[in-house]
Image (spheres, rainbow, N blue to C red):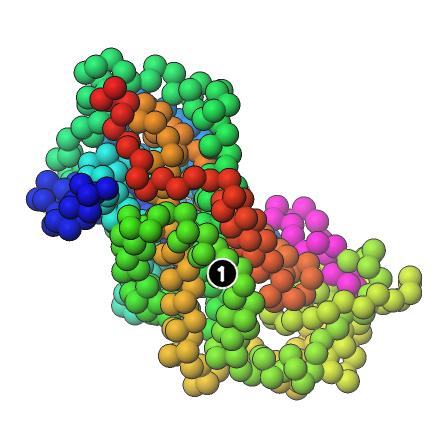
Amino acid sequence: MADAKAVQGRGISADERRVIFASSLGTVFEWYDFYLYGSLAAIISKQFFSGVNETAAFIFALLAFAAGFAVRPFGAIIFGRLGDLIGRKYTFLVTILIMGMSTAIVGMLPNYAQIGVAAPIILICLRLLQGLALGGEYGGAATYVAEHAPKGRRGFFTSWIQTTATLGLFLSLLVILACRTLLGKEFDEWGWRVPFLLSILLLIVSVYIRLQLNESPIFQRMKEQGKASKAPLTESFARWKNLKIVILILLGGTAGQAVVWYTGQFYALFFLLQTLKVEPQAANLLIAASLVIGTPFFVVFGSLSDRIGRKPIIMIGCVMAALTYFPIFKAMTHYANPDLEAAQLKSPVTVVAVPTTCSFQFNPVGTSTFVSSCDIAKSFLARNSVNYSNLPTLPGTVASVRIGEVVVESFEGAGLPKDEFKKRSDEFNKRAAAAIKAAGYPAKADMAKVDYVMITVLLTILVIYVTMVYGPIAAFLVELFPARIRYTSMSLPYHIGNGWFGGFLPTTAFAMVAATGDIYYGLWYPIVIAAATAIIGTFFLPETKDREIHHDADA
C-alpha cells in the first residue's frame, strides 16, 4: 500500500507518456472513423436509404449504425485471441488499418440514386468491418496501457484511453461543423464525404505512431518464459471460473456503463435533432461544448478510482443516471423547445383507433405499405415528433387524431389506387399539419428561444455520468482477468455491453417512442439496464484496485 501511494505521488516518465499518447491518439482516430457515421445518420439515411419512406429510412440508417456495434463482440473474439497469441501491438495495428480503409471507402461509395440497392448493402458491409476492427481495438489499447502502468496508477493511466471515444466523437463533430460552414448547402449533397476521406490522412499518422511502440513488457516476459496462452478462447469461455467473471462484469458493469455512455452522448444528440428539432449545427455545438467541459472528468474519476476503488464510482454513476434521466430530458425540452412543451400541455394529442389496425412503424426494406387509418395517422405524428397517447375505439371505426378540441379524421388506404392514395394522404397531411400548427406545435425549434446555457449544463451533467461509469472501467476489466488471457477475456464483455446493450440503444429507444407516442418512453431502456447493473455489480463483483496484474509473467 505504501508503494502504491508513493507511485501515485510521482510524475509520469517520458516512456509512460509516449505509451499513453501513442495508444490514445491512435484510438481517438479510430473512434473518429466509427462515429462519423452516427453523427451523419440523418444525411446518410437520405443518401443510401432513399428507396423507403422517411421514417423507415432514418430507423434503417440507425440500424446500419448499430450493425457496426452488433459485430463488435465477434471482433473481440477474433482479435482478442490474436492479441493473447501474438501480442498486443501487432493486433491493434491490424485493427486500425481495417478501420481506416473501411471509413475512407464510405467517402467514395456511390449512393442509392447511383447504384440502387447495392449502395446500402456495401455500406452495411463496411460498417461490419468497422465493428470487427473496433472489437479488437479497445481491448488491445486498454491492456497495452494498463500493462505499462505502475501499480496504484492503473486507473489514471487507462482513463486516458477512456477519453478517446469522447474525443473521437468531438473530433468528428468539429470536422463536420467545419465542413458544413465552408460548404453550406453542398455539404448535404456531396460535402459529407470529406470527413470520411480525411480518414486516409489520419490512418497514415496512426500507423506511423503505432509502429514506434514496443510490445507490452508483460506479454514479452510471458512469451520468453513460455507462459502465454495457447488456447485463449478455451481458457476464457470454456472454464466456469473465468466465464463466471465474464458474465458478471457484463451484467454488473459494462451493460450499465454502455447505456449511460450512449444515452449521455448519442441519444442526447438524436433527441435534440429528431425530437426537439434543434438546428443541426446548434445541436452539434451544444454537444461539443458539453464534451469540452466534461471530458477532463474521465481522468478525474480514473485517478479517483486508484484511491477509493473502481466499483463504487461506476455503481454510483449508474444509480444517478437512472434516477435523473426523466427530469433531465424533460428539462431539455423546456429549454430547447419551449413551444413544443407548451403545446403538449395546452393541446395534448390522442390517436383514437382500433388497436389491431395499428402496425409497428418500422419497415426498413420497404416491402410493406402502411395503409390503415391508424398507421397513416401515427406515421404523420412520428414524422413531426408529436407526442401522443392512444385511445382504443370500436371495430370498424376510422382512426382519428384529436389535437386539443380539434378532431382530424384519417382514412382507410387499403385497396385505393396509388394516385388516389397519394391524393388522400396529401389532404390528410395538410389538414393535420394545419391543426398541429394552430395548436402551437412547432415545425422546428425557435432558435431565438433556446436557452443555450441551461442546455449545455444539462448535457454536461449527462457527460459527467458517462465519465463516472466509463473512466474506471478499463482498469476494472484489466484487473479482473489473468494476463495470459486478458485481451480475450476483457474484450468480449466490454463489446457485448457496448456493442449490443449500448450500440442498439438509439434504435431501440427511437422504436419505443414510435410505438407508444411518448417522446420520453425510450428512456426506460437505459434506466432499467443501469439500475440492474448497479444491483448486480454492487452485490456480486469484487473490488480490484489493489490486485497484482503481472503474476502470469512472474510466477
Q: Nearer the viewer, residue 415 or 442?
A: 442
Where residue 143 appears, as percent x and y from the top left, is 29, 35
Q: Is residue 477 above or below residue 517?
A: above
Q: Nearer the viewer, residue 312 or 474?
A: 312
Residue beneath the point at 54% across and 71% down: 327
Q: Residues within 10 Å of mark 1 (few under 14, many from 20)?
A: many
Residue beneath the point at 83% across and 55% down: 356
The residue pinned by badge 1 equals: 321
Res 408 quadrant in image: bottom right
Q: Is residue 206 above or below residue 552?
A: below
The reply to whether the magenta stretch includes residue 286 is no
Mark 1 is on which residue type? Answer: Ala
Position of the C terminus, as image quadrant, is top left
Residue beneath the point at 44% across and 57% down: 317
Q: Main secondary structure of the magenta part?
A: loop
Where residue 197 appears, as percent x and y from the top left, is 28, 49
Position of the N terminus, as image quadrant, is top left
| Direction from residue 366 to residue 30 in the image, left or right | left
Could you say whether the residue bearing mark 1 is in a helix, strand or loop? helix
Using the rendered image of the protein, determine whether residue 304 is visible from the camera's viewpoint: yes
Residue beneath the point at 49% across and 73% down: 332
Extent of the magenta region: 359-375
Res 396 quadrant in image: bottom right
